[in-house]
Image: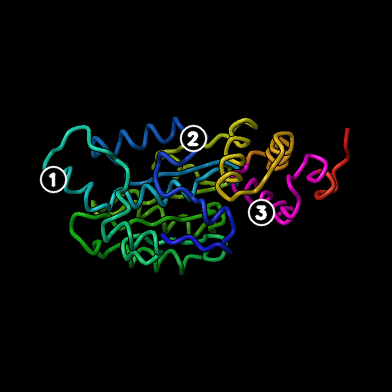
Amino acid sequence: MALNKSMALYHKYRPQTFVDVMGQEQIIEIITNALKSNRVYHAYLFCGPRGLGKTTIARILAKAVNCENKIKNLKFKIKNYNPEPCNKCQSCLSANGGASLDIIEIDAASNRGIDEIRELREKSRFSASNSNRKKTFIIDEVHMLTKEAFNALLKTIEEPLDHLMFIMATTESHKIPATILSRVQRFDFKKPSVDTISKHIDRIAKIEKIMLEPDAVPILSKLSEGSFRDALSLLDQVKELNNKAKITSEDVIKNFGLIKH
């Protein structure tokens, strides 16, 4: 994927493979093991605060399931193959460009009614563009669906067709009906440590040639409140101060109106 210099940092550095994802190692291990054994579940629920990588991992999983090289490895029963999407085949390239016919993303915050879920059910009847692939629906902020919409969705996932996979993401898992929870494989995403986010900020800053004094990095990390996305948004803001030799902790404190202790 070509990188646009004017692109927001959190878009520019969104992980495209599992190995690039930070802070969710246990979840990644379980998912990649399922891919290796060809035992991917039909419905997943990713829960946790915003900015932890729920939608990112959903996209990588959907891409890996439909990766042409991965499908070949399974067909020829190659052992211990790499479960990562290759990012080179036509399926992966289409997914990276947001043009895949087999990966359908839905924002439940703005498509929360029964009519939208009925439309999803209609689309789910059709197989993927290739018989070896899965038609994958990624439903973000799934807790926003109405009661009627959840009931319609339940009918689709309780008796799943072989060619379907659902990946749902939510920041409010307590709003998900028990009937849905009992039919999904649930993963709870944890907030990463300040040190983990600091390492991420420092790495991206060096790539972007943003000169940060070491003391400035943990301040940005704490301000992000555990969100990788917010961490890079904050870095985007302070890079405008890069006309100086180095951005100091004092600069960061002043820029965000913080009170120095």
- Badge 2 vs badge 1, beta-carbon distance below 8 Å: no
Query: Looking at the image, which is closer to me, 106 or 223?
Result: 223
| Residue 40 located within the stretch drawn in magenta | no
Q: What type is the residue that disc 2 sits on?
A: Gln
Q: Name the residue: 56% across, 65% down.
A: 110
Look at the image and tell me in which quarter the C terminus lies: top right
How far across and down, in percent of the image, does residue 237 sit? 71, 54
Q: Residues within 10 Å of mark 2 (few under 14, many from 20)?
A: some
Residue 74's place in the image compared with 93, above or below, is above
Residue 260 visible here: yes
Q: What type is the residue that disc 3 sits on?
A: Asp
Q: Name the residue: 80% across, 49% down.
A: 256
Q: Residues within 10 Å of mark 3 (few under 14, many from 20)?
A: some
Q: Which of the two marks, 3 or 1, is nearer to us in this view?
A: 3
How far across and down, in percent of the image, does residue 96 sit? 39, 59
| Residue 236 located within the stretch drawn in magenta | yes
How far across and down, in percent of the image, does residue 53 sit? 51, 45
Residue 205's place in the image compared with 149, above or below, is above
Q: Which residue is mark 3?
A: 236
Q: For mark 1, give the secondary structure.
A: helix
Which sits earlier in the primary sequence, circle 3 or circle 1? 1
Boundaries of the magenta span: 227-252
Q: Is residue 37 left or right of residue 246?
A: left
